[in-house]
Amino acid sequence: KQNRFVISMCNDPIVEPAELGFRYREMAEANFTLVSSTAWLTPAAARKWNEPTRMGHVQTALQAAEQAGLAFMGAVLDPGFDNVTGLFPHANSSLLDSSSPAMWGWLLADEPSPPAQFYMLRRMRAAIDQLRPDKLSFVNLLPNYAFPRNGPTGNWSSYEQYVDFFIATYKPQVLCFDHYPWFEVGDAAPFTPSTWAYPLSTLDGYRQNLALIRSKALANGNIPFWNYFNTIPYQIHRD
């Protein structure tokens, strides 16, 4: 059960670990409530990436989040999951047995698509639940403008089919999607710049996505639902 309204971000600030405490306090002052830590490091640190470095960074991030009064969602697969054995090779990681009140859980996957990936995520979730049934095993879904899809990413005739399959297979604690609409171009052609995502990448397409996720959340036991949304310009997005 959520004990706060979640305001978060996609990734950690890309700073040295020692600076995370300052940045997290800034976030708390701006009314952010949860850190989604994917253990981003500075370019120099990334070149020295290894398991101890990653684990150390995540521990620093967790401690900084607790001190700032933020909830914390750990990096993807910290510790790593072995899909063959169904075990966690790094089960001695203090993330799994952390008693920190800030520790909410883990981001297991971002934008999964092939059906086999959902089955793998279900196995990961079951393994985590054996150890920490009180924690969140979070998965973020694709937006509606990524459908229909065919080939290695799955044969999905519709976005609704994709969402229904995920809910039935994974039984999420939180239902979440990302959608980055274009506001400056309006909802009607001509659409500039042209994109394969038109027209669902418009404001109207975002409303449709939000409405579908809300209806599925309500129909499946009132699942809490979240949304990743672009709030700053990036790549070719200017609005």
Image: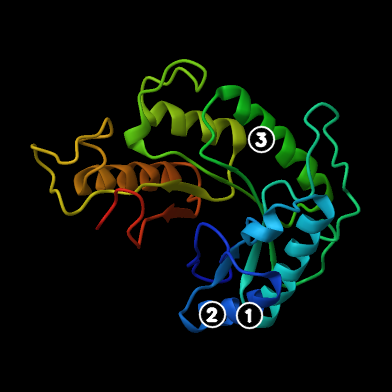
Residue 70 lies in quadrant? bottom right
Position of 73 with respect to 86 (left or right) is: left
Residue 10 can be seen, yes or no: yes
Q: Residue 155 in the image: x percent, y percent?
A: 45, 17
Crowding at dot 2, Cα within 10 Å, few <14 / some 14-19 / many 20+, comes out as some
Q: Assign the C terminus to one quadrant of the image.
A: bottom left
Label placed on residue 121? 3
In depth, the one of 166 and 139 nearer the eye is 139
- The span from disc 1 to disc 3 (Cα, nearest Å) is 30 Å
Q: Residue 114 in the image: x percent, y percent?
A: 55, 24
Residue drawn at x 49%, y 69% as measured from the top left:
5
Q: Assign the N terminus to one quadrant of the image.
A: bottom right
* Nearer-N-terminus badge (2/3): 2
Residue drawn at x 59%, y 39% as measured from the top left:
171
Question: Mark 2 = which residue?
Answer: 28
Q: Residue 147 in the image: x percent, y percent?
A: 36, 28
| Mark 2 residue element | helix
Position of 42 with respect to 236 (left or right) is: right
Name the amino acid type tagged 2.
Ala
* Nearer-N-terminus badge (2/1): 2
- The span from disc 2 to disc 3 (Cα, nearest Å) is 31 Å
Question: Mark 1 = which residue?
Answer: 69
- The span from disc 2 to disc 1 (Cα, nearest Å) is 7 Å
Name the amino acid type tagged 3.
Leu
